[in-house]
Image (cartoon, helix red, strand yellow):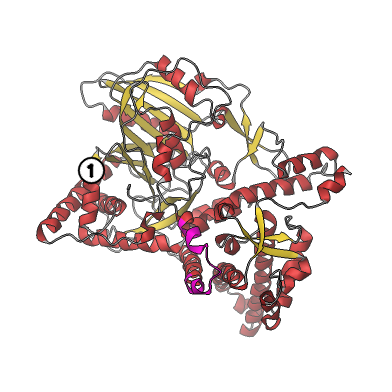
Amino acid sequence: MGMRMVNERTLDPTVELRPAGFVTRLVAFFIDQVIIGVALVILMVTVGILFRSFRLSELLGTRDLTLQLVTISLGAAGLILSFLYYVGFWLLAGQTPGKAVLGLAIVQTDGGRLRLGRATLRWFGYWFSGILFLGYLWILVDDRRQALHDKLARTLVVHRRLDERFLTLPDQVETRWQDLQQTLRTDAGDSDAVVVTEERRNGGGRDRTREPLSGVDAAMLELETPSNLTVINAVMILAERISFNDLKALVQNRLVPIRRFRQRVVPSVGPLSHLFWEDDPDFDLANHLHRTVLPPSDGPRQPALQNLVSELASVPLDGSKPLWEFHLVEGYGAGCALICRIHHAIGDGAALIQVLLSITSSESLPLPDAPAPEGAAPPLQGAAVASAGRRRSASKLLRQRLASAAHPSRVASLMATGWRAASALGGLVLAFPDSKTTFKGTIGRRKRVAWSGPISLDQVKATGRALDGTVNDTLLAAVSGALRRYLDGRGESTERVRLRAAVPVSLRTKATAGQLGNRIGAVFLPLPVAVGDPARRMDVIRRSMDRLKRSCLAPITFAGIQVLSLAPLTLKQTAVRLLADKATAIMTNVVGPKEPRYLAGALVEALLFWVPKTGGLALGVSIISYAGQVRLGVITDRGLVPDPEMIVAGFQTEYDALFSLADETRAGVAVREPTAMPDRTSMALESAP
């Protein structure tokens, strides 16, 4: 009886069985075909290069035979790619990227998930439906909006609820991947295995000692190397000294209750290896909380703290323990500093800034005497969440625009969106690598960090408005000018130099704002270091940002990382190296709280952080706003760029030039209000409201 109940597919509560219409399905199919088409173009170029490199036409003797072999190979590769793309996404996620963008899902007629047999039959049914397009036109007359291939496989294409759309793809993939692992185990037929699968499907008693890492979280660990640590380093500079015992009590009460900070990462056993979060049975706060005293000096204290942060940023975290550590640094002037190191696998920059701010308060209050209860909600819903929740992510805007996609008036716009996304992805893959500069080369393990002084956020906003840009346009233009100055100082020509920055983009919504983990995509921003005029450089940055915001590349790269997480490690590393060749730096911006914060009663004067780097990139640039101020943090490879302070100094000089230019603009003409596009706030790199 129990087995029969398990095999009977009940209605999936996350899916509303409202069939999708012809136009919506046509647009989704078009998006998928564009993605496959771009992949085939890349494959054709690769095959052509291989045939020419090995001179196979000369070996085969005739051009016709070579052409036939190429045609047959590409045809077979296209069929295999199509099968893997469609059937793979149907099984793992219940939707292809095209259908995910439009909020559609494919289910069995009883509402259950697709099985391999039905998915394969549905793919073969595509070819029957394609005969004179009649199988697809059947959607227009069928009561359940089924095409011929739906009839053959007994499937439905339905609308998901709004909150179950594109951003739930990683969770769907993760759950489905667990199902596949469970099915392939040798004891899958045992009753215990069936019970576990059924409990997970019903949201019931899951084993709480282990939690699988999502694809992006696992990639942060798997792609880490001794010379490229994926650890986020942050510093809080405090106006007053605090005691180590007070800090220990604060961390024990507010941070340790968050379960992820008591968990370590362990691999699974078996051919389908996977990484899991597991409660550390030997968790000891003493392993994560350290005390350091700077040597006495009569000079400025920033260089000493800078050297300490640089040394720590060069050392990996202990993988046998939870992946975080704090260092209280005493002897920093009249106050002290707290160095916080948290692995990127725990969360992205937006999530981890929230975690750090959860141990602070908005007022200088005494510490609570009693620790937080074990079952208390994680302290991630404070002021940091409020500021993050006001930002509209790229995915949220995309969902809003596509919510009424079935209406015919939206078709042209949606097709243009799909084309822009696919062309942006194809353009990135086929783009030339970045120029060889001092920022590119073989990196070592030792890092260097530096940071700027505070800049008034209101002043940056005013400068951006005067130059018809945003806060980020202004700051990125200043960073581009700083890199130009640094190359000039090293005697390297900046004429026709090509540099890009990989820019992480937050894909968080209000529903996911308080969650740990990584929900980020990426875009690749050209940096106009070859442009000498600050005003023109600002204009180039603004236009580049506008194009990237319309490209929808961020959610596509997010989905791509999820899919790539199922591939072997060598393939992941190859893909990361390929993308790293297209960039010189990683640049990110995090919006911190507007009001000052206090740690153990001491005012937090400054908040700094440094973005981790992957793929052999030597340069990381981080911008953070806090309490009405903006600061720049730079991390470099010591062997390639031993003096990041020069980049910071160049940044200040270039910003001053933009500020002066804005003053001249305000004095000379009436400043018109900026006509920013509605989606200008869709990036993580965006100005605060």
Q: Main secondary structure of the magenta part?
A: helix
Residue at 48%, 50% (x, y): give it.
507
| Residue sitting farthest toward the right | 1
Visible in this render: residue 81? yes
On screen, 1 above or below 366? below
As for residue 94 lying within the magenta part, the answer is no
As for residue 399 lying within the magenta part, the answer is yes
| Residue sitting farthest toward the left | 668
In the image, the segment drawn in magenta is 397-413
Residue 236 picture location, percent across and down: 35, 30
Instruction: Please indicate whether residue 97 sits to the left or right of residue 670 in the image.
Output: right
Q: Work out whether residue 678 or residue 208 is closer to the camera in this orientation and state it.
A: 678
Amino acid type indicated by mark 1: Ala
Residue at 63%, 31% (x, y): give it.
278
- Residue 642 lies in what quarter of the image? top left
Residue 121 picture location, percent across and down: 77, 67
Residue at 48%, 40% (x, y): give it.
230
Visible in this render: residue 580? no
On screen, 419 above or below 65? above
Instruction: Please indicate whether residue 419 sits to the left or right of residue 180 in the image.
Output: left
- Residue 98 lies in what quarter of the image? bottom right
Residue beneath disc 1:
649
Instruction: Please indicate whether residue 259 sits to the left or right of residue 304 in the image.
Output: right
Residue 379 picture location, percent across and down: 48, 31
Residue 480 picture location, percent across and down: 29, 53
Element marked by disc 1 = helix
